[in-house]
Image (cartoon, rainbow, N blue to C red):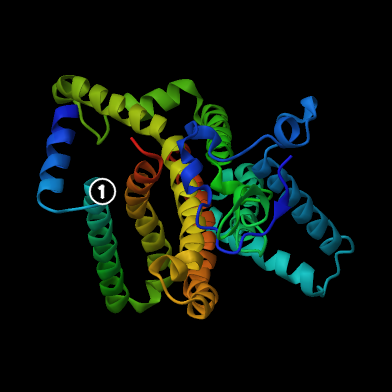
Amino acid sequence: MNSLVIAAEAAAVAGGVTGNIGLAVAGAGAAIGIGMIGAKAVEAVGRNPGASGKVLTLSIIGMALAEAIAIYALIMTLIGK
Amino acid sequence: MAKVGCPQFPETMPLLNLAAALPTIDAPNFGQEYLGVGYLEWLTNSIFVSLLVSVAVILVARRATRQMMLVPGPTQNIFEALVEFLHDSVESIVGKHMVSRVFGFLVTLFIFILFSNWFALLPGVGSIGWGHQTPTGFSVDVPLLRPTTADLNMTLGMALVFMALWVYWTLSEVGLRGFLEHTFGPKGGLQGIVKLLLIPIFFFVGIIEIVSILFRPVALSLRLFGNIFAGENLLTTMIGIGKQVGLPGWAASIASVTLPIPFYFLELLVGLLQATVFTLLCAVYIQLSTSHDEDEEH
């Protein structure tokens, strides 16, 4: 596992990438997830406008859970391995 | 003794002090290190702020509800609206039976986390403290006040207290046997030989569920800590970014006042959102393990 991490970082640096690869991938994943939740929420409200309160609550919870993974990666970056 | 002062551009803010051990990120002991008093060793700056927030909330709440009138005054109205909204939200998740037991703890958690998160936005929090003199001004190493939820100790403590209470509520609602059946038992109304064959599969599913239950306090604490701590760092970076990019003195000063404004509102929203998510997730966890009380209506 450690050699894999070292290999990935060496490949990133050789390709001219500065910054943290883990945080980049986690951030991309979180952004995609939150976007999908938002899209489905808007579609649900469009189909059933009366459910907008419940849909809002559920989508906020879902977005916070999806964003938490990116926050873990951010904490790992700030604190160091 | 280091002197207390305000930095002009706090570019060496707590980010560099993160190298310390993980739980005590930049939370100095006032008692031992700065006041020189041994018995106050537990008093770190985030504990001090948590005491301030608690005392402030309790005082405001007591004053607002001292004479409960039928037609409420303004502060009583605010508290009534807040408590009623939360009561409806929690009741819709947890169910009528459990809400009377868990509501007190959950609404306390919500109010405390909300005002702790918003405390970070007051002027002077994080920028006044002990530090050293650098050529470009005074640099704060150890703040006097910092938001208490930006300390992993506080959020971990809240998450662990919730887990202990969750265990107590679950066991007193459904009992140990009910909990084990709920976790490891075959579900879905299977009969006979198929049920016997699928028991090992459900057993492994139960093991995975136990692991995910054990992960809950980690996730709860890290989510809240990460959001508030990152927000604090974001605001600090935005204040100092004019100087870092290399703008002339007057432009850097203007940028350090105007650039943080949208991030300030973002932090307002994030503080409210994280308090809501913490509370609602706690309610959902309680509902997950105590809800099958209702479909055993024999």
Q: Residue at x 43, y 75 (%)?
A: B247
Q: Nearer the viewer, residue A49 or B112?
A: B112
Question: Total of numbered circles in the picture?
Answer: 1
**In the rendered image of this protein, does residue A24 appear above or below residue A44?**
above
Q: Chain of mark 1?
A: A
- Using a 10 Å C-alpha cutoff, classify the residue at mark 1 as few (fewer than 14 neighbours), some (14 to 19) or many (20 or more): some
Q: Nearer the viewer, residue B149 or B7?
A: B7
Residue B58 shows in the view: yes
The percent coordinates of residue B219 (x first, y second) are 41, 41
The percent coordinates of residue B16 (x first, y second) are 47, 45
Residue under numbered circle 1? A20
Q: Amino acid at mark 1?
A: Asn
Query: Going by the picture, which residue comes out furthest to the front?
Result: B135
Q: Residue at x 36, y 62 (%)?
A: A59
Whether residue A13 sits left or right of residue B24 in the image: it is left
The percent coordinates of residue B122 (x first, y second) are 65, 64
Whether residue B197 sits left or right of residue B155 in the image: it is left
Q: Nearer the viewer, residue B298 or A6?
A: A6
**In the rendered image of this protein, does residue B22 appear above or below residue B232?**
above
> Element under label 1?
loop
- Quarter of the figure that contains the N terminus of chain B: top right
Q: Residue at x 35, y 56 (%)?
A: A62
- Quarter of the figure that contains the C terminus of chain B: top left
Q: Quadrant of residue A55?
A: bottom left
Q: Residue at x 18, y 19 (%)?
A: B196
Q: Nearer the viewer, residue A8 or B213?
A: A8
